[in-house]
Image (tube, rainbow, N blue to C red):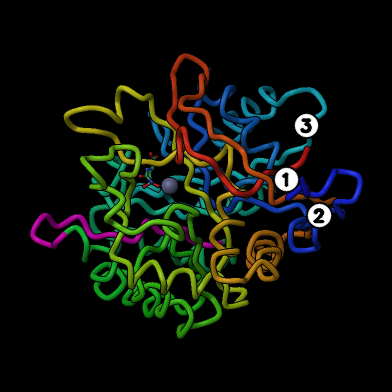
């Protein structure tokens, strides 16, 4: 019988498009939490990324430079021996943040941004901002430093439909704030709509955006596929397919205004699978594989390095990383559950096969 499969000896090496080499990338939006969970999730990110912008929504939130310094030390102490990883710290903006704290942050050398959570918008946002105009002195100080304001861009008004909250925030809160502070630099975090993509691509150079892998790969049908899917629930919530396509177009456009931010957000399995489940998708362990899949789906792998490794440092005014990472088109099974510190986390794509694998 004629063999249908060539023997391994005559199989050529992987085609060029099956092996992807990128300058070492960064994650510009990450939740690490604290304590045992932080220590246990940290290596998922440090394996993939050289740096990550670490969100300050701890309990209590990281509102001062002194707290950020302590948090940074705890992160560095939890790194596995030999890992080189730099946490880029952020401050949590409140209506009581003094302008002096912003100045201190800018001079610290390790705080790289200030995060705006509208009060009640998402996980641990209760200490956030009710009326952004109450923060104008802090925003003026921030604009002077050139450090960006990172924005969770959703209004919290219960009368506004949850699928419209991003669009309404951009019109009613962010546009006026940008007009009040013409030097203020802003990253609209984890954008989820065509309106947000247009706001950024058609706006000023001082406005950029991060995109998550899950918003590039899924639309809101994923929340209800065959039943309620709590592990697909994050904020801002997934939107309809036309929005996903607009986000993919933005991410793969080659514009340096769009860069990688996983928004990986670990929550214990039982708090996701709950009558009132927490918002957040855990993607840190397979982040680059998920982004590669999204870019590959539209034939845009050649744009991944710009998005993952070049645009973020340019916006933040930080050097490019040395070194490289390699991804191979080789299937890998995502574990159904990951033990992380004292909790079990269900990763995105739990129990499914990913087409790409990050090589160590
Ligand atoms: C984040 C979290 O769990 O801290 N959750 C999420 O759904 N993205 C908070 C946030 O970024 O909104
Ligand atoms: Zn987040």
Query: What residue do we see at 64% from left, 48% from top?
Result: 356
Looking at the rendered structure, the secondary structure element under dot 3 is loop
Dominant secondary-structure state across the stretch colored magenta = loop
Residue closer to the observer: 147 or 328: 328
Classify 77 as above or below 330: above
Q: Which residue is mark 3?
A: 83
Rendered location of residue 240, percent (x, y): 28, 65
Whole-percent x, y for residue 325 in the image? 78, 49
User: Judging from the image, what secondary structure is the residue with disc 1 in?
Assistant: loop
| Residue 50: mark | 1
In this view, 43 is above or below 55: above
The residue sitting at 23% across, 53% down in the picture is 130
> Which mark lies nearer to you, 3 or 2?
2
Q: Position of residue 344 (x, y in %)?
A: 44, 20
Find residue 14 and name its label: 2
Q: CA distance from mark 3 to mark 2?
A: 29 Å
- Residue 245 lies, in percent from the top left, at 41, 71
Residue 62: in sight, yes or no?
Answer: no
> Magenta segment range?
148-161
- Distance, label 1 to label 2, CA atoms, is 26 Å
Of badges 1 and 2, nearer the viewer stands 2
**Which of marks 2 and 3 precedes in the sequence?**
2
């Amino acid at each position: 019988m004629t063999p249908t499969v060539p023997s391994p000896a005559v199989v050529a090496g992987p085609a060029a498009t099956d092996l992807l080499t990128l300058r070492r990338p960064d994650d510009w939006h990450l939740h690490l939490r604290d304590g045992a969970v932080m220590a246990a999730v940290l290596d998922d990110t440090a394996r993939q990324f050289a740096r990550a912008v670490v969100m300050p929504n701890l309990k209590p939130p990281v509102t001062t430079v002194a707290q950020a310094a302590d948090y940074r030390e705890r992160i560095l102490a939890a790194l596995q021996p030999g890992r080189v990883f730099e946490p880029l710290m952020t401050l949590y903006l409140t209506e009581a943040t003094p302008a002096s704290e912003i100045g201190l942050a800018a001079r610290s050398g390790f705080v790289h941004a200030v995060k705006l959570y509208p009060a009640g918008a998402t996980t641990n946002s209760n200490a956030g901002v009710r009326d952004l105009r109450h923060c104008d002195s802090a925003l003026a100080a921030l604009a002077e430093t050139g450090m960006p304001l990172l924005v969770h861009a959703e209004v919290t008004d219960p009368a506004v439909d949850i699928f419209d909250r991003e669009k309404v925030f951009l019109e009613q809160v962010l546009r006026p704030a940008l007009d009040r502070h013409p030097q203020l630099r802003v990253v609209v975090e984890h954008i989820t709509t065509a309106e947000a993509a247009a706001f950024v691509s058609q706006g000023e150079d001082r406005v950029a955006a991060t995109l998550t892998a899950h918003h590039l790969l899924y639309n809101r049908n994923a929340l209800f596929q065959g039943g309620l899917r709590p592990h697909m629930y994050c904020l801002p919530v997934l939107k309809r397919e036309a929005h996903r396509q607009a986000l993919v177009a933005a991410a793969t456009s080659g514009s340096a205004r769009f860069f990688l931010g996983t928004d990986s957000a670990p929550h214990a399995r039982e708090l996701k699978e709950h009558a009132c489940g927490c918002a957040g998708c855990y993607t840190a362990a397979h982040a680059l594989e998920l982004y590669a899949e999204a870019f590959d789906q539209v034939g845009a792998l050649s744009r991944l390095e710009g998005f993952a490794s070049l645009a973020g440092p340019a916006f933040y005014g930080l050097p490019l990383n040395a070194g490289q990472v390699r991804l191979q088109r080789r299937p890998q099974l995502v574990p159904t559950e990951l033990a992380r510190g004292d909790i079990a986390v269900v990763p995105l794509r739990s129990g499914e096969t990913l087409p790409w694998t990050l090589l160590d």
